[in-house]
Amino acid sequence: MQKKYLDESKGVQLGTWWDDISMIRGWSGEKLGYTTQKPEALLERIIKASSNENSIVADFFMGSGTTGAVAERLGRRWIMSDIGKPAITNYSSDIDEISIELDNYVLLSPDALPLDTENREKLQGVMAREPLALIEYWSVDPDYDGETFRSKWQDYRGNTENDDDPFRVVKETRILAPKVKGKRKICVKAVDVFGFESVVVEVLDAE
Ligand SMILES: C[S@@+](CC[C@H](N)C(=O)[O-])C[C@H]1O[C@@H](n2cnc3c(N)ncnc32)[C@H](O)[C@@H]1O
């Protein structure tokens, strides 16, 4: 007679038909309201079978982000992306949405510019009416370390990706950035049509 002990048994190899993991029900605590969300148990099986602790798990169509949440719980590092904002904001406990608006631009020494009378008057008109129209390019580092500026977002005249006006930059933007502990330093750099660069640094208290 042969004795078999359950805790020593290697079990049965997993097949291709998995019917032991149920769908997420309406009342489930896992449910985030994302239509294509998958059960955590399903992701846990896939991640355990295909990676080790400290591996990098990537899901470039993260949707509800369950892959990243389970990868984190299982000690994996992870990279998640999604084209859709609703997907990213599901991760809002880890991500801040930062809103930045330019409210003015002051050209410091207009008299030093080599302009004839006619163009000087035109410039004075733009400075009075619409000073932000003098901005050629601006960019934002939402996690400025005080030394190296790393642009995470930018707009420039001629770029119609952020709006359909090729003669002006947009005046506001919203950026998603990983939450920080303590204070967040945001650096905004602008270059005007004459090539003068200006820099503004704002420090925000994290919530
Ligand atoms: C089927 S859903 C993801 C399901 C996800 N595994 C879950 O558990 O929720 C597909 C996702 O792919 C995203 N997507 C579609 N085209 C994309 C693209 N070109 N780049 C990045 N994400 C994209 C959609 O926004 C959507 O969130």
Image (tube, rainbow, N blue to C red):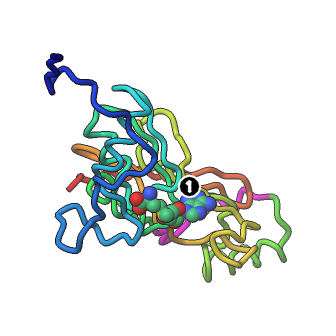
Is 185 situated left or right of 31 in this image?
A: right
Query: Could you say where residue 39 lies in the image, as x and y percent from the top left?
Result: 31, 57
Q: Which residue matches tag 1? A: 153
Residue 36 in the image, given as x and y percentages of width and height: 41, 67
Q: Is residue 47 above or below residue 102?
A: above
Q: As rendered, which of 207 and 5 lies closer to the eye?
A: 5
The quarter of the picture where the C terminus appears is bottom left
Question: What's the amino acid at mark 1?
Answer: Trp
Q: Nearer the viewer, residue 104 or 156?
A: 156
| Category of crowding for the residue at label 1, using alpha-carbon neighbours closer than 10 angstroms: few (below 14), some (14–19), many (at least 20) | some
Residue 197 visible within the image: yes
Looking at the picture, how far across and down is residue 9, in whole percent? 22, 24
Q: Magenta stretch mostly in which secondary structure?
A: loop
Q: Which residues are magenta?
A: 101-113
Coordinates of residue 69 in the picture (x, y in percent): 31, 48
Q: Tell me which residue sits at (48%, 72%) in the image.
A: 103
Q: Residue at x 41, y 50 (%)?
A: 186
Residue 71, quarter of picture: top left
| Label 1 element class | strand
Left or right: 78, with 167 as reference point: left
Identity of the residue drawn at 23% across and 53% down? 205
At horizontal 51% and vertical 56% (from top left) the residue drawn is 61
